[in-house]
Image (cartoon, grey):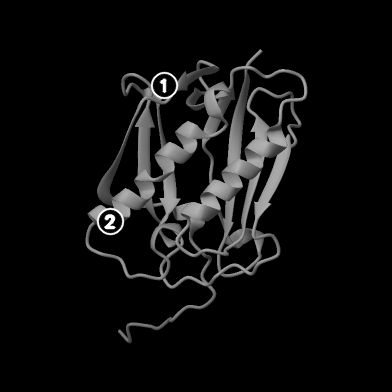
């Protein structure tokens, strides 16, 4: 029986605090989920692949795999690390700035399409932001496609998971456009404020 997997890929930035962890959550299907399949190996392969991909080598990464259809409470079936114990690098740009990797299965109807908002600090370190997502940044995000599509070999598919249909669809197409995206939940809380009165 196939197992449908949500991978929580965790990227600490600036501090080790939970509030400073940015995540992306690609989904996968194990088509031949025999007893004892190597969930740990799959998680480690993904962590290592993301480590090879990220701009700042040596930044810590954690990958947790969850059974999408597991009975609550659902605990991780595997946890893997790259650069465990390393300090998260500081960033100079807003953590909420992202480049969107869009994808779909066969045709882009709502239940067959998905998006991953890739944090810009993983794409280009501390570089400044251009007016648009330039071709170089788009190409770096596109490098995630063969990582996700090839993960685990023939038995593992990169999928779009439809919560409404409780169905998985293998990703067939993708794109990265040149517009920045903002994931407001990744923004830091204000720690100070400038106030005043109008004097009127």
Where residue 56 sits in the image (x, y, percent)?
49, 65
Taking the image as shown, residue 26 lies to the left or right of residue 35, namely left
Disc 1, SS: helix
Report which residue position mark 2 lands on.
Answer: 136
Left or right of 91 on screen, residue 4: right
| Quarter of the image where one finds residue 6 | top right
Instruction: Name the disc covering residue 180, or none.
Output: none
Can residue 197 be seen here? The reply is yes
Q: Is residue 36 left or right of residue 168?
A: right
Residue at 48% x, 36% y is 148
Q: Residue at x 37, y 32 (%)?
A: 103
Name, please, the residue furthest toward the bottom.
Answer: 199
Rendered position, 56 above or below 191 = above
Return the x and y of residue 109 as percentages of the image width and height. 33, 21
Quarter occupied by the N terminus: top right
Which of the two marks, 1 or 2, is nearer to us in this view?
Answer: 2
Q: Secondary structure at mark 2?
A: helix
Counting residues from the start of the chain, the first of labels 1 and 2 encountered is 1
Q: Quadrant of residue 176?
A: top left
């Amino acid at each position: 029986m196939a197992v449908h997997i949500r991978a929580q890929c965790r990227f600490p930035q600036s501090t080790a605090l939970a509030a400073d962890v940015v995540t992306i959550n690609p989904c996968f299907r194990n088509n031949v989920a025999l007893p004892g399949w190597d969930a740990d190996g799959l998680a480690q392969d993904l962590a290592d692949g993301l480590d090879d991909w990220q701009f700042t080598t040596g930044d810590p990464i954690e990958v947790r795999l969850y059974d999408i259809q597991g009975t609550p409470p659902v605990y991780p079936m595997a946890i893997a690390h790259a650069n465990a114990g390393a300090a998260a690098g500081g960033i100079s740009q807003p953590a909420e700035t992202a480049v969107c990797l869009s994808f779909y299965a066969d045709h882009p109807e709502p239940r067959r399409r998905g998006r991953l908002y890739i944090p810009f600090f993983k794409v280009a370190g501390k570089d400044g932001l251009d007016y648009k997502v330039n071709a170089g940044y788009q190409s770096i995000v596109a490098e995630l496609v063969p990582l996700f599509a090839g993960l685990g070999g023939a038995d593992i598919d990169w999928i779009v998971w439809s919560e409404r249909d409780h169905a998985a669809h293998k990703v067939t197409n993708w794109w990265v456009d040149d517009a920045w995206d903002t994931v407001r939940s990744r923004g830091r809380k204000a720690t100070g404020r400038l106030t005043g009165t109008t004097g009127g």
